[in-house]
Amino acid sequence: MVLLSRETPSPALVLGFAGLVPFVMLALVANLESGTPRIEAINIFFSYGACVLSFLGGLHWGLALADQLAPHERWVRMSYSAVPPLLGWLSLLAPWMQGLAILAVAFLLQYRMDRRLAQQADHLYPEWFLPLRLMLTVVVLLCMLAIARVL
């Protein structure tokens, strides 16, 4: 199993891993602190997770705009982009444990959709993208497990 490709562009690596910093730091604060700092860390974790889901959904919107697609396929790809922010928003409204489950499922589904698109004949993503996405998704899910530990 290839963890990361040598062809992964530096900006993708740096910005991808920088995007993990809030997840990791907030999970640490939630596990090391109590009272108000813990509550604030958990709330911020959910908000950040919802924002990242919106960003990931936007990838599919951009792909739908850039490609010459049949109307049905454009609907499918644009739907992929609209669902993640809605799930992120729902995670903010739900009680914490259910919200965390919504976030976890949404991140897994988003990775699955990215993987599906990457396997299509037109190769929408470069070869380095999926290994990077998998690694980032795994770290986010591990942070969610750390948050679940204190809920």
Image (cartoon, rainbow, N blue to C red):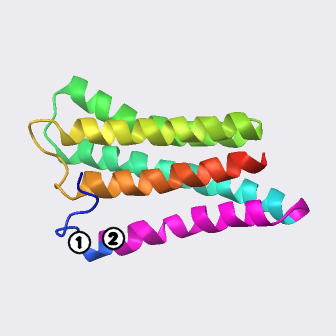
Residue, x 72% and y 37% (percent of image)? 97
Q: Quadrant of residue 31?
A: bottom right
Question: Is the Cβ of the residue at disc 2 closer than 8 Å to that at disc 1?
Answer: yes
Of the pair 82 and 119, the residue shown nearer to us: 119
Q: Amino acid at mark 2?
A: Leu
Residue, x 49% and y 56% (percent of image)? 139
Can residue 22 be seen here? The reply is yes
Of the pair 115 and 6, the residue shown nearer to us: 6
Q: Amino acid at mark 1?
A: Pro
From the image, tell me which residue sits under label 2.
13
Question: Dot 2 lies on which element?
Answer: helix
Q: Which residues are magenta?
A: 12-36
Categorize mark 1 by other alpha carbons within 10 Å: few (<14), some (14-19), many (20+). few
From the image, tell me which residue sits under label 1.
9
Q: Position of residue 58 (x, y in %)?
A: 39, 49
Relative to 90, is 19 above or below? below
Q: Tell me if 3 is positioned left or right of 122 in this view.
A: right
Categorize mark 2 by other alpha carbons within 10 Å: few (<14), some (14-19), many (20+). some
Q: Tell me if 109 is positioned left or right of 119 in this view.
A: right
Q: Quadrant of residue 8?
A: bottom left
Residue, x 16% and y 68% (percent of image)? 7
Distance from disc 2 to disc 1, alpha carbons, whole Å, reads 7 Å
